[in-house]
Image (cartoon, coloured by chain):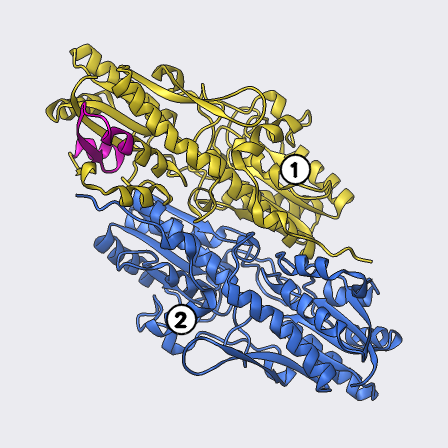
Chain colours: A blue, B yellow
């Protein structure tokens, strides 16, 4: 163990359990003599650049535990991709504060940021452990079986689809639900966990991993309407055409600092698809909802295993950095073979997690590209856990 | 008590607790010897016109209880306004089946339907009790202090805003949340129940009861951004300009069978407002979510008092019709004076509940027309009850 101060920050889209990782890391660090001060940077690297810090040693255990159970990023977040000049500036601040342990909680962009800062420190011969702590509701980090944040967001999606199924049974027509996930369809796929009986929603699922054809979509919906007299459809916000252009990108121009089109926080994709169905199929009642930010923030919808694992990746990162003296890395969640469901936490090299995203394996998507397979259900079910209210729901026997 | 068969149906938008009213009425009728067969019409008056019935006596108590706890309309619903010819046809079916007790669960349009059928029966000299059982998440029925369905939907809205507040604190900018309520702002106003501290969301609330001015909206948001550095805004889907034209109606043409513009099931209003703020205030991050159908169907978000009252209005309607032998009416919920919160159920004439809607009283809206008053909070709090997960949430002390 090298003695030094610790700095931790949160980045990217918040989740229901990202504060579990923060509490896990800080409470684990409390117990280790090598760790001096514990700084929290407000709003990720922006807080480091602005030297906007709080003293996490002064937060009581009770506060940290309450914060752990609170959605969103308690330190504040940021969507800023650091330039090389930013990284040098960040590194200067870390050196000034004698930071020897740096933890960055976020997705693959955050892993990339930790990776760049780590390289900067190596080049300068400055001894620091740079660790990425995984978080993303998109479930798209490489090396991990799944990511903290996914299970809870997936639970929201499955629950919402269950309620929507009942609503659609009452009034009929077509309901389109647009679900988050720019490049990976895992969250949209979780809609399938709502299905118990063969005629339950969702009836169709469209993922960014398969080329979206408007003609095929219209034909699929027509077939479902013929079979069930109604249709509930789960669509990923990131569906794209054969060229890889997001369907929505043709209609909007806003890009974020990573050069990405804004897909979330707008109802445009759902409306676009609804209008297409109305005009092509002459169905009177077509409605679209975009689940939006509720997927990552709706109070109380938390997967127990997700919350526990989010806590443990924070603990594991501190152990790897401080106790095991590893100079850098990320923490991957590996699923143990066999039943019952269990996982182990494994340090992996930063560059293996940085930048690129993981997609839904082909084995999880049906041949037609409009639903998931049983293999996906078996994969996802333990991550989400039971949907207690839904399991008590009933329909009339209708004698 | 006159002996005869009973028919019950559900109409309009589903809610989280409309099946409580169904179970309440059916289980109450079970105990009364005057009631013969208990028919359920599928999809409201459409099921009567099509003679599409189920035998509700054959549903077990266990099924009815499970259905009571299930969101959406278990009998199916309909949005069809009966023509005079429809009413004559409906009446013929009722006579053929020797229906002497007719119960229609729904909003003011459903009360109007029950009223017309009742008048038809009187004109023909046919003895029947026609009762409306109130249901609407909009809380806009006259005669009642509040309506079954509102408390649970309001709980969803307040919870969602609480989660959204935490999300917005992390990433900043402006968040617009569009909430259901065509003519009445009660559901949008419930967003205010999310506020505990002075800087909590929502920061602005726009209701259909006040003229919406785009210029004032932009100025309001600018002021909030200056004060808090962020803004979470609750907007009713039904906001309208000085002429009473819905803001959204300028951008969409779809109307339902009641001649109303489609306001729900589209993200267009949120996107419209977001684009306005982006262009006028030059704020980079502006996002809009439309809470949509989740407000009335999301599993597990139920106000306990709402569920109990929804059950009791069903029981009260059967009592009024069968035991007290009243020929027609609706059941109003009256709030008892003083503490603790308690209500009584009172039969009221159908015509007093039919057609017209109730609006937010002026005392519930602030002078500027962009927030609610303390009087509204005191009114709404007992209807929604506690928000258990939110009450355990915490933020870092940030030393």
Location of residue B147 in the rendering, given as x and y in whole percent from the top left corner? 45, 29
The residue under the point 56% across, 54% down is: A293
Nearest the eye: A154 or A60? A60
Q: Quadrant of the C terminus of chain B?
A: bottom right
Question: Quarter of the image holding residue B13?
Answer: top left
Query: Does residue B183 belong to the magenta stretch?
Result: no
Q: Which region is colored magenta?
A: B26-50
Question: Quarter of the image holding residue A213?
Answer: bottom left
Q: CA distance from mark 1 to mark 2?
A: 41 Å
Give the secondary structure at mark 1.
Answer: strand
Neighbour tally class for label 1: few under 14, some 14-19, many 20 plus, Cα within 10 Å: many
| Residue where numbered disc 1 is placed | B204
The residue under the point 47% across, 29% down is: B139
| Residue where numbered disc 2 is placed | A210
Q: Quadrant of the N terminus of chain B?
A: top left
Query: Does residue B40 belong to the magenta stretch?
Result: yes
Location of residue B383 in the rendering, given as x and y in whole percent from the top left corner? 52, 33
* Left or right for B314, reference B306: left
Give the secondary structure at mark 2.
Answer: loop
In which chain is the residue bearing label 1? B
In which chain is the residue bearing label 2? A
């Amino acid at each position: 163990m090298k003695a030094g101060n610790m700095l931790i920050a949160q980045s990217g889209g918040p989740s229901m359990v990202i504060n579990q990782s923060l509490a896990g890391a800080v409470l684990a660090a409390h117990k280790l003599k090598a760790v001096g001060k514990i700084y929290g940077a407000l709003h990720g690297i922006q807080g480091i650049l602005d030297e906007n810090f709080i003293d996490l040693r002064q937060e009581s255990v009770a506060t940290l535990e309450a914060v752990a159970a609170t959605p969103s990023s308690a330190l504040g977040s940021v969507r800023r991709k650091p330039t090389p000049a930013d990284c040098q500036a960040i590194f200067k601040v870390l050196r000034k504060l004698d930071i020897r342990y740096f933890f960055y909680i976020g997705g693959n962009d955050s892993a990339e940021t930790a990776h760049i800062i780590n390289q900067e420190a190596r080049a300068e011969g400055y001894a620091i452990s740079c660790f990425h702590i995984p978080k993303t509701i998109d479930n798209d980090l490489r090396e991990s079986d799944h990511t903290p944040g996914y299970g809870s967001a997936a639970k929201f999606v499955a629950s919402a689809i269950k309620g929507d199924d009942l609503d659609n049974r009452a009034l009929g027509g077509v309901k389109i639900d647009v679900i988050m996930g720019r490049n990976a369809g895992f969250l949209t796929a979780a809609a399938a966990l709502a299905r118990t009986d063969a005629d339950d929603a969702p009836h169709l699922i469209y993922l960014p991993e398969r080329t979206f054809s408007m003609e095929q979509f219209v034909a699929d919906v027509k077939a479902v309407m013929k079979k069930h007299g109604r249709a509930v459809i789960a669509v990923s916000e990131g569906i794209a055409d054969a060229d890889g252009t997001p369907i929505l990108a043709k209609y909007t121009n806003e890009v974020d600092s990573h050069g990405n089109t804004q897909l979330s926080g707008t109802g445009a994709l759902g409306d676009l698809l609804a209008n297409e169905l109305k005009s092509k199929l002459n169905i009177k009642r077509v409605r679209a909802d975009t689940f939006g930010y509720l997927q990552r923030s709706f109070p109380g919808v938390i997967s127990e295993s997700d919350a526990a694992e989010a806590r443990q990746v924070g603990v594991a990162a501190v152990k790897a950095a401080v106790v095991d003296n590893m100079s850098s890395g990320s923490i991957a969640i590996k699923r143990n073979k066999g039943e019952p469901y269990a996982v182990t936490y494994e340090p992996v090299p930063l560059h293996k997690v940085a930048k690129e995203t993981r997609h839904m394996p082909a084995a999880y998507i049906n041949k037609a590209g409009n639903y998931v397979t049983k293999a996906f259900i078996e994969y996802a079910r333990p991550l989400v856990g039971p949907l207690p209210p839904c399991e008590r729901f009933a329909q009339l026997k209708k004698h």
